[in-house]
Image (spheres, grey):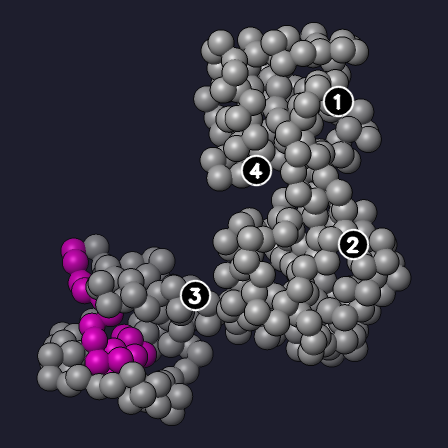
Amino acid sequence: MPNCFWRAAIKISNTLRPTASILVNRLLARGKFRHVQMLLKLAELGSIQRTADAIGVTQPTVTQSLAGLEELLGVALFERHARGVRPTPACLDVLPAARQMFLGIAETAEMVLARHTSGKGVVRLLASASAINGLLLRALPEFSRAMPQTQVQLREAENDDLLLAITRGEVDLVVCRKPGVIPESWAFHPMQADELVVVCVPDHKLARRRRLRWTDVQDETWLLSPAGTLARAAFDDVSAGFDAVRTYPLVTRALTVSIALLREEKLLALLPRSFVQHLMDRGELCALSLPDMPAMEGIGLLAPRAGMREAPAALFEFLSKR
């Protein structure tokens, strides 16, 4: 890469102090989507040549695009080293916004394509793991059969990430437990009750016991949910009365891994019923009969109070009737 580009960017960084408004106007007037793609790929690969190969352009094109972007922003975004380039602190500041912008571009393409091919548009749906494995596991296939021209883009998230996606305008509907704070202009609609259950595989030694006490399970080995989840908080409260707590050394929310460990290691786990009901229905897991199970909030639908597009409104109406 010619040194003049790097020196020019550094010189600009040291001599100009543009305002935020000036930078916005520069990016709107001269910025390109290709700048975003190149920035993200260069940060990922750390090589001008590999970046050029990955996005299908020449090495000089990447070099010139980078120089142009650095000129727009007035900062050096990468520094050279023996094996390629590495992001500067300024670049690390920019990368999260660039990733969001790229996701927005991809999402726009999906929505336009869905409109062209089906005519009914897209629903951007975000849901917790319990909602996906419980309510939505049955509801979404039914909706797709009833509304085949509407595309549903489902993503999984938990806790604050759900609310952050709403704040950023990244979703149309959210299925989750009632949050402590509901975003302005959104409303929560309760849909499905839930409870915590202690589960194991059917051939576990305790599976056929009809009446159990907590003292009967305190010596078992437990698979833990991650800290910060309702299930983990409930387990911590319950196990405070155990003489000792034996836990498996892997903590996970991944359902496939959890089921394999419950089966192979003969573990117990305290989980939301919604999270594992479909596995209990198939006989892969069973719930132990224990008294005084901790209570938990049910699952509901977070939706805008007004202004929903046609496709999200159709899914909202469908889910509300279940």
Q: CA distance from mark 2 to mark 1?
A: 25 Å
Residue with the mark numbered 2: 140
Q: Earlier in the sequence, mark 2 or mark 1?
A: 2
Q: Secondary structure at mark 3?
A: helix
Q: CA distance from mark 1 to mark 4?
A: 20 Å
Residue 267 as seen in the image, left or right of residue 207: left
Which residue type does callout 3 highlight?
A: Arg
Residue 234 as seen in the image, left or right of residue 302: left
Residue with the mark numbered 4: 230
The mark closer to the camera, 2 or 1, is 1
Q: Position of residue 57 (x, y in %)?
A: 40, 74
Decide which of 230, 82 is in the foreground and name it.
230
Q: CA distance from mark 4 to mark 2?
A: 25 Å
First to last magenta residue range: 63-82
Q: Earlier in the sequence, mark 2 or mark 3?
A: 3
- In the picture, the disc for residue 286 is 1
Q: Quadrant of the N terminus?
A: bottom left
Q: Earlier in the sequence, mark 4 or mark 2?
A: 2
Which residue type does callout 1 highlight?
A: Cys
Residue 71 on the magenta segment: yes
The mark closer to the camera, 1 or 4, is 4
Q: Secondary structure at mark 2?
A: helix
Give above or below for 287 relative to 133.
above
Q: Residue at x 35, y 90 (%)?
A: 25
Residue 159 as seen in the image, left or right of residue 310: left
CB atoms of marks 2 and 3 within 8 Å: no
Give above or below for 126 relative to 222.
below
Which residue type does callout 2 highlight?
A: Leu
Q: Secondary structure at mark 4?
A: helix
Q: Earlier in the sequence, mark 1 or mark 4?
A: 4
